[in-house]
Image (cartoon, rainbow, N blue to C red):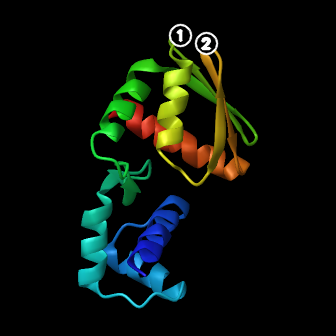
Amino acid sequence: MKNARQEKIVELITKYEIETQEELASYLQQEGYRVTQATISRDIRELKLMKLTAADGKQKYTLMQSQTPGINDKYLRVLKDGFVSMDMAQNILVVKTVSGMAMAVAAALDAMHWNEVAGCIAGDDTIMCAIRSAEDTVRVMDKIQKIVRA
């Protein structure tokens, strides 16, 4: 039950811009999960959710840590160091990297386990990410921008 609830939390914060624990609890209840504020708080801590400031100035929960300690920090650093630019073509995200870094940056993107990303193909300095929809592509671009600007 706990694992299913936490997977649902990750899905919800990926899909919606959730600002508060109360808002998260409401979404979970709509999905059939009976939760208390204490449960939400504990799940947030265990999932290592963070709040980021969105473009509109509001804060939202985001998953910035993988379930394997230490690995995500390395991937975040690789993403920041290798990233050059990105552009979208509907549901395809094209990421340009420093020469020779595309495979490492693609591995970093895959390690984020974002629901929107179906998969990545990397060359020497270019990555093509298959994204589930054009709207999801915009969300992924926003997530990447927040990581590389941090």
**Residue 59 placement: quadrant:** bottom left
Note whether 37 is above or below 55 in the view shown: below
Q: Where residue 20 is drawn, which disc sits there?
A: none
CA distance separating discs 1 and 2: 5 Å
Residue type beneath disc 1: Gly
How many numbered circles are shown? 2
**Residue at the spot 33% in from the left edge and 31% down from the top edge:** 74
Quadrant housing the C terminus: top left
Note whether 33 is above or below 47 in the view shown: below
Q: In this view, does 95 lie to the left or right of 21?
A: right
Residue 39 location in percent, x, y?
Answer: 28, 81
**Do the residues bearing badges 1 and 2 touch, measured as CB atoms within 8 Å?**
yes
**Residue at the spot 31% in from the left edge and 71% down from the top edge:** 43
Mark 1, residues whose alpha carbon is within 10 Å: few (<14), some, or many (≥20)? Answer: some
> Which residue bears the numbered disc 1?
100
Q: Specify the farthest residue to the top.
A: 99
- Classify mark 1: helix, strand or loop: loop
Nearest the camera: 24 or 35?
35
Residue 116 location in percent, x, y?
Answer: 61, 51
Q: Is residue 1 left or right of residue 37?
A: right
The first of marks 1 and 2 along the sequence is 1
Residue type beneath disc 2: Asp
**Residue at the spot 36% in from the left edge and 87% down from the top edge:** 35
Residue 130 location in percent, x, y?
Answer: 70, 40
**Residue at the spot 45% in from the left edge and 19% down from the top edge:** 82
- Classify mark 2: helix, strand or loop: loop
Note whether 12 is above or below 139 in the view shown: below
Mark 2, residues whose alpha carbon is within 10 Å: few (<14), some, or many (≥20)? Answer: some
Q: Where residue 124 is drawn, which disc sits there?
A: 2
Quadrant housing the N terminus: bottom left
Note whether 61 is above or below 52 in the view shown: below
Residue 51 location in percent, x, y?
Answer: 31, 56
